[in-house]
Amino acid sequence: MNAAPVPHEIHAQLSGVTRTYPTVPGAGAKMPVHALGPIDLDLLRGEFFAVVGPSGCGKSTFLEVLAGLQQPTAGAVTFEGKPVGGQVPEGIGVVFQEDASFPWLTVWDNVAFGLRRSGVAAPELRRRVEDAIAFVGLKDFARAYPSQLSGGMRQRVCIARTLVLQPRLILLDEPFGALDAQTRLLMGDEVLRLWRRTGATVLLITHALDEAAMLADRVGAMSARPGRFIEIIATGWPRGRDSTIVGEAAFGEITGRLWERLRGESLKALGHAAVPAMAAE
């Protein structure tokens, strides 16, 4: 779990992936919705990849297809060389924006939940749970209930619950969207520390351009629906980075470039663009 990443080794891959929903709920006529793709992406082992795009462009659909929670309409998804589909493969962990902690369980029992279901022996379970709780800074709150924690602390519980399963690919679906800007920066530092310690590949879905620019090795900018990558930007940050890079000139250049690519797509998503769909390509 602590192995160094292998440069340029493909860890997960999407090839010609599309996702179409057959109907719009509540619509008078059956109208298929082309939500995603086609998408091609080689996700490299050990990298931090972020995805940004307009509201409704299919970012979360993209993550769910990669995780095996949805089946692509066309194309193929692989993780560690094996097809993905039907269920989340062993080795992939997912953290969603919504607070997924069980309110009737303590922090300790929330983090232990998945290991207990997997039948992990008690000594190993205890070691891994205590390590994960300490890593996310909740050692003093191990016996607290979610209602006694702040929003940021509850999100740490969800991260610890994923971390304890020792995933090799961690998928984060806007996990800090409900937090204020300052707390998001600090949580970003925690995620970077997690990424460096574990050596896992991380894919982050976010609506915040500054968050993507700070955290990622590469940022994929998506078009308005149907979502596809219109540009993938390498940030060039060192692996040991933290939130202090937001004060660097290069940080402003990266966020500016992302907004330049996404502004027109966001207008299309809002229905305000008079530009043809291919104009941003």
Image (spheres, helix red, strand yellow):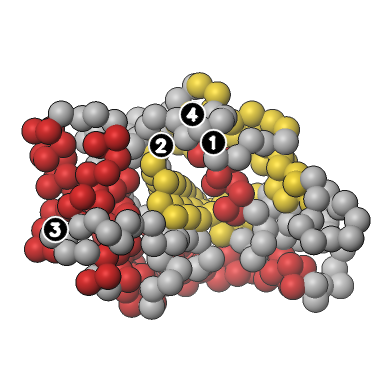
| Amino acid at circle 1 | Gly
Distance in Å between CA atoms under marks 1 and 3: 31 Å
**CA gap, disc 1 and disc 2:** 9 Å
**In the rendering, at what x and y percent does residue 171 appear?**
44, 46
Q: Residue 249: x, y in percent?
A: 42, 72
Nearer mark to the viewer, of 4 and 2: 2
- Residue under pointer 1: 68
- Label ID, residue 92: 2
Rounded to the nearest angstrom, the CA distance separating label 4 from label 2 is: 9 Å
The residue positioned 60% from the left and 34% from the top of the image is 14
Q: Amino acid at mark 2?
A: Ile
Type of residue at label 4?
Answer: Phe
Q: Nearer the viewer, mark 1 or mark 4?
A: 1
Q: Residue at x 30, y 61 (%)?
A: 103
Q: Are marks 1 and 2 in contact (CB under 8 Å)?
A: yes
Q: Earlier in the sequence, mark 1 or mark 3?
A: 1
| Amino acid type of the residue that numbered disc 3 sits on in the rendered structure | Ala
Q: Which mark is residue 142?
A: 3
Q: Nearer the viewer, residue 84 or 25?
A: 25
Q: What residue is drawn where x is 71% and y is 40%?
A: 18
The reply to whether residue 78 is visible in this rendering is yes
Q: Earlier in the sequence, mark 1 or mark 4?
A: 1
Q: Are marks 4 and 2 in contact (CB under 8 Å)?
A: yes
Label 1: how many Cα within 10 Å (few below 14, some 14–19, many 20+): many
Left or right: 207, with 146 as reference point: right
Q: Earlier in the sequence, mark 2 or mark 3?
A: 2
Mark 4 = which residue? Answer: 79
